[in-house]
């Protein structure tokens, strides 16, 4: 009986030690957030620059800068309005944007805050961006209030980008290069 208890105790102790080592390793792999504050420039409705740093607002997708949407039977420059809205939100002196991941274009993926306001979420609530995995509740609120994009019809920004890539021949060129180089 005592021997069985020791075996169980030793097993539990070994498991606890492995779990502790795993937690320590995970913590060591955490990269600290890179935080920027200052004069941000909105490149479009979900991209910012400060100095030479390019940033992408994490969890949202805004209309492309050249994108038009429809409202009340008329086209409106929703991409331009999204950019202007973001610029207004990041204009406050206390705005900070931070993140630790980068996207495929080497842009820092950030969440921006100003005066306690989550700017990423605010872009979605105002209907100037759609949720891209993180702001579903805010998107539901914008839809129900028919805010911004939801006041009419629009193409999702990712669909606009896909269409533009196909029109430009980028995908065909990429496939050709992949075939020639064997990088398919």
Image (tube, rainbow, N blue to C red):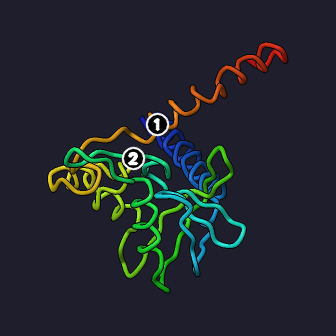
* Residue nearest the viewer, comparing 24 with 181: 181
Residue hosting label 2:
68
**Most extreme residue toward the bottom, as rendered?**
93
Classify the position of the C terminus by image quarter.
top right
Q: Residue at x 29, y 48 (%)?
A: 136
Determine whether label 2 and label 1 are within 8 Å by CB: no
Report the side of 172 relative to 69 (left or right). Answer: right
**Most extreme residue toward the front, as rendered?**
74
**Whole-percent x, y for residue 167 in the image:** 57, 27
Task: Quote the CA–CA distance across marks 2 and 1.
Answer: 10 Å
Residue hosting label 1:
160
> Mark 2 packing: few (<14 Cα in 10 Å), some, or many (20+)?
some
Report the side of 114 relative to 25 (left or right). Answer: left
> Mark 1 packing: few (<14 Cα in 10 Å), some, or many (20+)?
some
Q: Is residue 80 above or below residue 143?
A: below
Q: Residue at x 66, y 28 (%)?
A: 170
**Whole-percent x, y for residue 19 in the image:** 54, 47
**Whole-percent x, y for residue 15 in the image:** 53, 42
Tell me the SS state at disc 1: helix
Q: Residue at x 21, y 51 (%)?
A: 151
């Amino acid at each position: 009986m005592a021997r069985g208890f020791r075996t169980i105790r030793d097993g539990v102790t070994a498991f606890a030690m492995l779990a502790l080592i795993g937690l320590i390793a995970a913590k060591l792999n955490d990269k600290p957030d890179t935080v920027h504050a200052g004069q941000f420039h909105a490149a479009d409705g979900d991209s910012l620059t400060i100095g030479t740093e390019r940033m992408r607002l994490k969890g949202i997708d805004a209309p492309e800068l050249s994108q038009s949407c429809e409202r009340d039977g008329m086209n409106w420059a929703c991409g331009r309005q999204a950019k202007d809205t973001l610029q207004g939100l990041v204009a406050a002196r206390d705005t900070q944007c931070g993140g630790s991941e980068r996207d495929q274009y080497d842009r820092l993926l950030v969440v921006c805050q100003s005066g306690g306001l989550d700017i990423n979420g605010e872009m979605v609530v105002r209907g100037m961006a759609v949720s891209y995995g993180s702001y579903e509740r805010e998107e539901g609120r914008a839809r129900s209030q028919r805010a911004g994009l939801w006041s009419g019809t629009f193409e999702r920004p990712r669909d606009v980008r896909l269409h533009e890539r196909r029109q430009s021949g980028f995908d065909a060129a990429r496939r050709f290069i992949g075939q020639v180089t064997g990088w398919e």
